[in-house]
């Protein structure tokens, strides 16, 4: 046997040994995967997680079990994932709060680098809504009324530091008007008072108000994205009246930092396939969201941009959480 042939055979043996020794390349996943949703059951994030999890289960050959861990502005569930083993078996569904919490709460129980990105599932606009019999029919109507009587108009949110609150703060900043923020402990109370005429408007997620809009109880005025939405073709953007305005809902998956890149690649591939299925697309588009999918790097870049934008809004408006 020549020296060259001996070297080739030895290289092959070493390569096979490395493959056999690698737990990543062995058979991941070998057990159920836990998908933590830092919100209560039944909401839009929960629906997205369960639909995506079903698709990923079929692809990965293991159950993807949704674990709802609500509380503390998503911090309880997010912290649970940060402290989980970095083995790919625990993920968290991240949303708007994930990008804003570091600015709102500098003493988080986890470090900002405690997570590794997997995929940006989808993103889409919120909707500026008023009650059906409101005198305000356009964004211009609201801006004009607020300019005429500063602080007389009110907008509801599901709590200080939430997407609805910060969307309102950005609106008043860019429009150079004063509108009174009325925070509630959850979206249900905010919508109840909006319907009852005790507050004037709300920057709500489409999933929260879709049935009320379809039932004629709320009137949508504009979408909050920088461009018009295919899900709300008849609605203008807020930015058409207030240049520079842009607010989006978004949803992504993260694993604990230190998770093997090979495991992340496999999770990303499964999530991409599940997110691009007809069933998932249909459900997300009904919520006014656009399926993005893509690479971990795209999620990382997007969220870093969101963190920077909202850090400025939080600081300028001295936003505090309850």
Image (tube, helix red, strand yellow):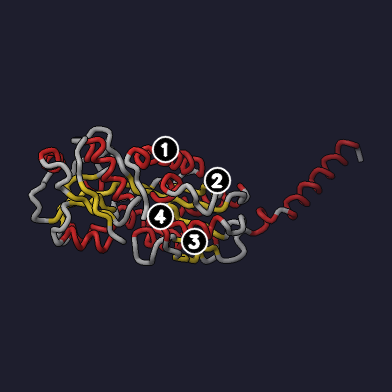
Q: Do the residues labelled 3 and 2 touch (CB within 8 Å)?
A: no
Q: Is mark 4 on a helix, strand or loop?
A: loop
Q: Label 3: which residue? A: 35
Name the N-terminal-most of marks 1 and 4: 4
Residue that label 1 marks? 308
> In the image, which is nearer the foreground, mark 3 or mark 2?
2
Hey, which quadrant is residue 143 in on the image? top left
The residue identified by callout 4 is 277
The one of 146 and 306 positioned closer to us in this rendering: 146
Measured in 3D between alpha carbons, the distance from the residue under mark 3 to the one under mark 1, in whole angstroms, is 27 Å
Residue in view at x 51 percent, y 59 percent: 59
How far is the residue under mark 1 from the one under mark 2? 15 Å
Taking the image as shown, residue 21 lies to the left or right of residue 239, namely: right
Q: Is residue 46 visible?
A: yes
Separation of marks 2 and 4 at Cα, in angstroms: 31 Å
- Which residue in the protein does label 2 denote? 113
State left or right for residue 138 relative to residue 274: left
Element on which disc 3 rests: strand
Which badge, 2 or 4, is on the more N-terminal residue?
Answer: 2
Of discs 2 and 4, which sits in the foreground? 2
Residue 218 found in image quarter = bottom left
- Asked whether the beta carbons under mark 3 and mark 1 sit within 8 Å of each other, the answer is no
**Element type at mark 1:** helix
Task: Point out the frontmost of discs 1 and 4.
Answer: 1
Q: Residues within 10 Å of mark 1 (few under 14, many from 20)?
A: few
Q: Give the x, y percent position of residue 80.
A: 53, 60
In the picture provided, is 37 more to the left or to the right than 13?
left
Instruction: Out of 309 and 11, give the one closest to the viewer.
Output: 309
């Amino acid at each position: 046997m020549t020296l060259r042939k001996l070297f080739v055979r030895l290289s092959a043996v070493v390569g096979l040994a490395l493959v056999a020794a690698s737990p990543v390349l062995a058979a991941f996943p070998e057990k159920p995967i836990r998908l933590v949703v830092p919100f209560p059951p039944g909401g839009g994030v929960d629906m997205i997680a369960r639909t995506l999890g079903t698709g990923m289960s079929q692809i990965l050959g293991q159950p993807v079990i949704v674990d709802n861990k609500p509380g503390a502005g998503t911090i309880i569930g997010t912290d649970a994932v940060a402290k989980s083993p970095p083995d790919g078996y625990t993920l968290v569904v991240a949303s708007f709060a994930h990008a804003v919490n570091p600015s709102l709460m500098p003493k988080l129980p986890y470090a900002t680098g405690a997570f590794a990105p997997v995929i940006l599932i989808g993103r889409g606009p919120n909707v500026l809504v008023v009650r059906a019999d409101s005198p305000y029919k356009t964004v211009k109507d609201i801006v004009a009324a607020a300019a005429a009587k500063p602080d007389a108009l009110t907008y509801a949110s599901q709590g200080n530091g939430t997407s609805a609150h910060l969307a309102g703060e950005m609106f008043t900043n860019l429009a150079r008007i004063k509108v009174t923020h009325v925070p509630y402990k959850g979206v249900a109370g905010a919508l109840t008072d909006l319907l009852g005429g005790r507050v004037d408007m709300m920057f709500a997620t489409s999933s929260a108000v879709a049935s009320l809009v379809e039932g004629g109880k709320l009137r949508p005025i504009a979408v909050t994205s920088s461009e018009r939405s295919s899900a709300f073709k008849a609605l203008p953007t807020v930015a058409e009246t207030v240049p520079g305005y842009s607010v989006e809902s978004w949803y992504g998956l993260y694993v604990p930092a230190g998770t093997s890149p090979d495991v992340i690649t496999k999770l990303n591939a499964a999530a991409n396939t599940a997110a691009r299925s007809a069933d998932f697309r249909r459900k997300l588009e009904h919520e006014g969201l656009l399926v993005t999918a893509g690479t971990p790097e795209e999620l990382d870049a997007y969220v870093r941009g969101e963190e920077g934008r909202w850090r400025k809004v939080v600081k300028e408006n001295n936003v505090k959480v309850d």
